[in-house]
């Protein structure tokens, strides 16, 4: 069963609401935020898909991070981050635990997971968006910074996140909250496509790979992933490209 389109609608909040965007209803947002869910860092890339022969019924949705959009990332461990996995046979997205297991088996990484919870308020999400630093060293696209130098509070910002993504652990609901700074930048100078730049992709050692999974995935989820050393070899062989195993 093919899905028509992959879309994550926004979660309404007083400080992040932007005209012209699609939002969850109040009831949808409340259902999502008041049952078990995970909150991930939203990363600023281009959505793409890939499939693996080892998982013939699955479509992997990933953020392609080679090109700098609005945020310049200085230490990304790969150019592809798996954000969701769709089971074409059942017509559903995989639950969080299965998504994580399939992601590491392909040698790819998920975005950093901030926390797992059964209740999060809109105000708490806003606080994360405005105060939490990215897991990767970031700044505004350097080509954009030149055009924004007359607005120092934008041009000089460091280590910002694009926002957060909230997903039910069952995989059947999702929403996002985005820093409104991005819309302000677009209003000032236009979209990122006019400002060509490349993110910095840094190959991880085995120790660094294991540390990423332990600190950015296992610890916030409260799980333990076995055989990370074996999966590191897959990461090394598929670095900066789509898996073919």
Image: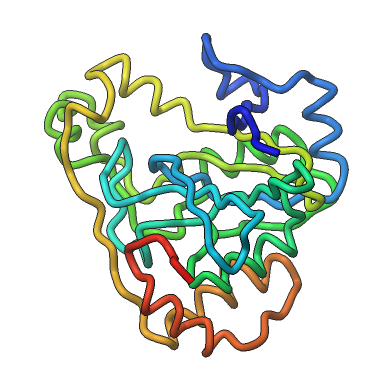
Count the marks: 0
Instruction: Give the residue drawn at x 57%, y 85%.
Output: 228
* In-image side of 243 versus 166 (left or right): left
Q: Position of residue 3 (x, y in %)?
A: 65, 34
* In-image side of 133 versus 115 (left or right): left
Q: Quadrant of the N terminus?
A: top right
Q: Which image quarter: residue 15? A: top right
Which residue extends farthest top? Answer: 19
Instruction: Give the residue drawn at x 39%, y 59%.
Output: 136
Viewer-closest of 242 and 221: 242
Viewer-closest of 34 and 239: 239
Q: Which image quarter: residue 95? A: bottom right
Q: Which image quarter: residue 242? A: bottom left
Instruction: Give the residue drawn at x 77%, y 37%.
Output: 121
Q: Position of residue 2 (x, y in %)?
A: 65, 36
Its colouring scheme is rainbow
Viewer-closest of 156 and 173: 173
Q: Position of residue 30 (x, y in %)?
A: 83, 30
Q: Position of residue 217 (x, y in %)?
A: 62, 68
Q: In this rendering, is residue 45 above or below 230?
A: above
Instruction: Give the residue drawn at x 78%, y 29%.
Output: 29
* In-image side of 75 versus 242 (left or right): left
Q: In this rendering, is residue 222 above or below 206?
A: above
């Amino acid at each position: 069963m093919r899905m028509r389109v992959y879309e994550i609608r926004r979660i309404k909040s007083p400080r992040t609401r932007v005209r012209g965007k699609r939002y969850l209803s109040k009831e949808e947002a409340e259902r999502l935020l008041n049952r078990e869910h995970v909150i991930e860092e939203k990363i600023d890339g281009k959505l793409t898909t890939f499939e693996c022969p080892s998982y013939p019924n699955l479509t992997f949705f990933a953020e392609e991070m080679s090109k700098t959009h609005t945020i310049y990332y200085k230490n990304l461990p790969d150019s592809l981050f798996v954000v969701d996995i769709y089971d074409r046979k059942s017509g559903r997205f995989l639950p969080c635990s299965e998504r994580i297991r399939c992601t590491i088996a392909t040698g790819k990484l998920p975005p950093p997971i901030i926390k797992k919870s059964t209740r999060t308020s809109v105000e708490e999400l806003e606080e994360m968006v405005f105060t939490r630093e990215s897991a990767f060293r970031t700044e505004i696209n350097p080509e954009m910074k030149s055009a924004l130098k007359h607005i120092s509070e934008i041009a000089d910002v460091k280590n910002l996140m694009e926002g957060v993504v909230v997903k039910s652990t069952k995989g059947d609901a999702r929403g996002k909250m985005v820093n409104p700074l991005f819309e302000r930048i677009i209003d000032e100078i236009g979209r990122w496509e006019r400002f060509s730049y490349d993110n910095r992709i840094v190959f991880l050692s085995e120790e660094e790979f294991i540390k990423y999974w332990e600190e950015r995935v296992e610890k916030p989820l409260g799980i333990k992933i076995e055989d990370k050393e074996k999966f590191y070899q897959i990461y090394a062989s598929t670095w900066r490209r789509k898996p073919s195993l």
